[in-house]
């Protein structure tokens, strides 16, 4: 199946629709994905897209957010990109423990739910992978 790609205006009101469309793509690509995995993916995508809109693009509706998904061999590969200034993700690498600070909890939660996560372009692009639909 071809990849899923959407570019949307930095508007928090659009995140739920983008996440729903992404879940539909995942369901079509991986019919054996279960409801727990879909819940995790909804949480992951919501956190990353909300962060891109609020923290990355600072709610500037003149800036865009891009989500790309691709499925191969029961693994979802995704990229979330914003047009913001980025962030110092090295501060997040030292701990997997939840933070009680105002920022950083979403990324900590995402890190716990994905198989791999990589930060590119000074934090303006986040790549992750998650294996789903494989049940023993």
Image (spheres, rainbow, N blue to C red):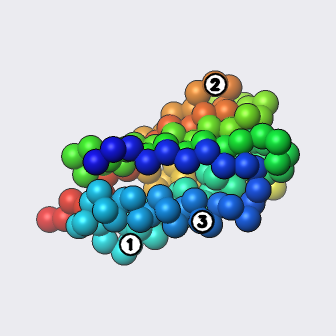
Label 2: which secondary element: helix
Q: Where is residue 59 in the image (x, y as percent from the top left)?
A: 83, 50
Q: Which of marks 1 and 3 is nearer the N terminus?
A: 3
Q: Earlier in the sequence, mark 1 or mark 2?
A: 1
Q: Mark 2 points at which residue?
A: 121
Q: Residues within 10 Å of mark 3 (few under 14, many from 20)?
A: few
Q: Is residue 95 visible?
A: no
Q: Name the residue under label 1.
A: 36
Q: Position of residue 131 (x, y in %)?
A: 31, 51
Of residues 36 and 108, which is closer to you in this image?
A: 36
Which residue is the extreme one toward the bottom? 35
For marks 1 and 2, give the CA distance: 31 Å
Of residues 52 and 93, which is closer to you in this image?
A: 52
Q: Position of residue 72 (x, y in %)?
A: 27, 44
- Residue at (52% x, 66% y) in the render: 20
Check whether the beta carbons of the residues at disc 1 and disc 2 lie within 8 A of each other. no
Determine which of the numbered discs, if any, sits on residue 9 in the image: none
Say whether residue 68 is left or right of residue 120.
left
Taking 48 as reference, is 19 above or below it?
A: below
For marks 1 and 3, give the CA distance: 20 Å
Determine which of the numbered discs, if any, sits on residue 17 in the image: 3
Q: Where is residue 70 in the image (x, y as percent from the top left)?
A: 37, 44
* Number of on-image labels: 3
- Residue at (73% x, 34% y) in the render: 83
Taking 36 as reference, is 26 above or below it?
A: above
Label 1: which secondary element: helix
Q: Residues within 10 Å of mark 2 (few under 14, many from 20)?
A: few
- Residue at (82% x, 48% y) in the render: 61
- Residue at (62% x, 66% y) in the render: 16
């Amino acid at each position: 199946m071809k990849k899923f790609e959407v570019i949307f205006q930095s508007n928090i009101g659009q995140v739920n629709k983008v996440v729903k469309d992404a879940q539909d793509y995942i369901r079509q690509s991986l019919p054996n994905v279960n409801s727990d995995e879909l819940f995790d993916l909804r949480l992951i995508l919501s956190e990353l897209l909300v962060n891109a809109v609020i923290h990355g693009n600072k709610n500037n509706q003149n800036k865009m957010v891009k989500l790309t998904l691709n499925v191969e061999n029961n693994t979802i590969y995704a990229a979330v990109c914003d047009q913001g200034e980025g962030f110092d993700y090295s501060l997040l690498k030292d701990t997997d423990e939840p933070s009680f600070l105002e920022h950083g909890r979403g990324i900590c939660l995402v890190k716990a739910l994905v198989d791999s996560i990589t930060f590119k372009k000074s934090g303006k692009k986040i790549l992750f992978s998650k294996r789903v639909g494989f049940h023993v």
